[in-house]
Image (cartoon, rainbow, N blue to C red):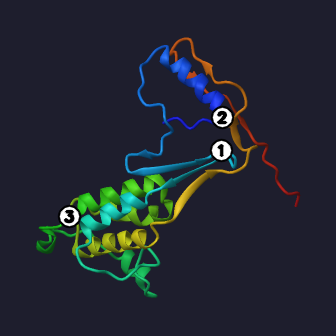
Amino acid sequence: MILPSSKEKLEWFLTEYRKHYSITGGEPTTKFNGVYLVQNVEKGTVSIHLKTYIEQVYRKYVTAPARPQLHPTESLADSHEKFMAIELAEKPDPAMADKDYDGIVGCLGYIVAQGRPDCSFHVSWLQQFSTSPPLAAWQAAITVLLYLYHTRDSCITYGGRSDFLRCDTEPKVDPLTTQAVPCYRKRKQSYPNL
């Protein structure tokens, strides 16, 4: 995936890259493994959208109409305690025989890793039940998916300040690996005097 800061840097990179590898395409990356990328060169931002992927996962695992979720756990006052009280089943739950728990938790993990860190705690908590999931864990996973579906227009945006991290020189080519090595300049962190 190439996210250049300018057209000149893209051309330079492609010229150096083509010396060693053959590439096809050359158009900007807008979709990568179900993730849509939107780059705003003027603002210096890259936004990651997962709306389409979340909709696909929703259609796969939610079979009946469901009410929208405003939080990854149910919206009841004791929902967090109920979520944390889920325990690993000692023997396989017969109600889970036709449910793809590893599939839904894997999809949720992908969504969290790619651009929805707001659910990372909930998904990592649910991942511990993969060996013998109880029905309550399945229901909690569906609740997290409903929340993601309800908030599917949310995205994560990186950048926005030209002085944060940027390549202030042309990337150099490492002579040993023949790969481009970007040079980044860090923004100086300022702390308030207390």
Q: Residue extending furthest bottom?
A: 77
Distance from Cα at disc 3 to Cα at disc 2? 51 Å
Q: Secondary structure at mark 1?
A: loop
Residue linked to disc 1:
41
Q: Earlier in the sequence, mark 1 or mark 2?
A: 2
Q: Are marks 1 and 2 in contact (CB under 8 Å)?
A: yes
> Dividing the picture into quarters, in which one does residue 79 lie?
bottom left
Q: Amino acid at mark 2?
A: Ser
Quadrant for the C terminus in the image: bottom right
Residue 191 shows in this picture: yes
Q: Are marks 3 and 2 in contact (CB under 8 Å)?
A: no
- Mark 3 Cα shell of 10 Å, populated few (<14), some (14-19), many (≥20): some
Q: Residue extending furthest top?
A: 175
> In the image, what residue occupies the spot 40% across and 70% down?
149
Distance from Cα at disc 1 to Cα at disc 3? 47 Å
| Residue 6: numbered disc | 2
Q: Amino acid at mark 1?
A: Val
